Amino acid sequence: MKGFFKKKEKQMLETKPKKTKVRTVGTRKKTVTILWVLFIGSLAFAIYKNFTAIDQHTVHEREIIETKILDTSAIESFTKNFVKDYYTWQNEKDSIEEREEKINYYLTEDLQALNTDTVRDDIPTSSSVSNIDIWSVIPDNDDTFRVVYSVDQKITEDKDIQRIRSTYRILLHQDNAGNLVIKQNPTLWSIPNKSDYEPQQPESNGTVDSDTVQEVTEFLETFFSFYPTATDKELAYYVRDHALPLINQEYVFSELINPVFQEKENQIKVWVTVKYLNETTKATQFSQYELILEKDRNWMIVE
């Protein structure tokens, strides 16, 4: 009997299931630590980007550009007075001495000494100024200005008379009180030349049909025939919001020259030259217009 129980116990021990080993990953393992570091870093970066993005949208920078208006009236008047005195003399000692005294008022002491002999006592010519043109007044720095001018002179020598035109540049100093002095002598210079710019000429692009062209042409001929003497009330019937000013002068309409028509968004744009005869001078006047027309009940010039 005892042997029987031992045998039974042995069988039970043999049939008891074996316990499966389970590997667990602890929070202190290197891989988990790395993952946590990446997660926390990503979260911190996302929060940082979020706040900086908000800052970029809420902070607005404004650049304020101040426009400084340069008043050159005093500089131009000072220059013209100087030019008149500098280029005017008679071939007489008293006149030459008077000129020297006058120009010293405009010049620094160094320039006064330099200009002592510009017009000698024995000079055979006399000079008078007929016209002065100021071409440019350009700031050289905060207190110095470059002025380019032309002067027309009548030069008389015995019975011979010549008219010459010359261009010069001077440098002027202006102090805080607005006082002026010339610090560089008149230096030979040049005036601006004619530009070779040619504007692009508009062309009709076929957007306006022939009936509309005829209708608009008739409207313009009617309008420009009375426009020079039109009253404000008459003008309001053809022109909206004072797109063209009152003229109130005697001009006789002659013709429209080379009108160009283009249609855009229910409007007609017209480039046209209007030929008039000036009743007073008897000269021909060519006035050039760039107009925008609209039609409601009748055609109107809107711009």
Image: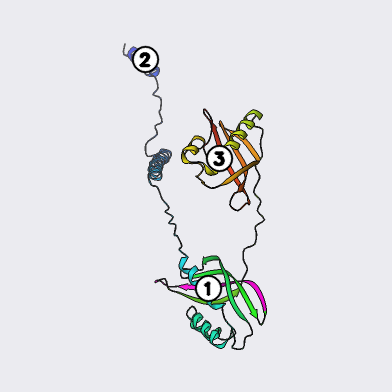
The circle drawn on residue 7 is 2
Magenta-drawn segment? 160-178
Q: Position of residue 175 (x, y in %)?
A: 42, 73
- Judged left or right of residue 214, residue 240 is left
Say which element carries label 3. helix
Circle 3 is placed at which residue position? 226
Say which element carries label 2. helix
The circle drawn on residue 149 is none
> Mark 1 or mark 3: which comes first in sequence?
1
Circle 1 is placed at which residue position? 171
Q: Residue shown at 61%/41% (left/top)?
A: 271
- Judged left or right of residue 201, residue 293 is left
Q: Residues within 10 Å of mark 2 (few under 14, many from 20)?
A: few
Look at the image and say whether residue 211 sits in the magenta stretch. Answer: no
Characterize the magenta stretch by its predominant secondary structure.
strand
Marks counted in the figure total 3
> Mark 1 or mark 2: which comes first in sequence?
2
Q: Amino acid at mark 3?
A: Phe
Task: Look at the image and tell me in which quarter the N terminus lies.
Answer: top left
Say which element carries label 1. strand
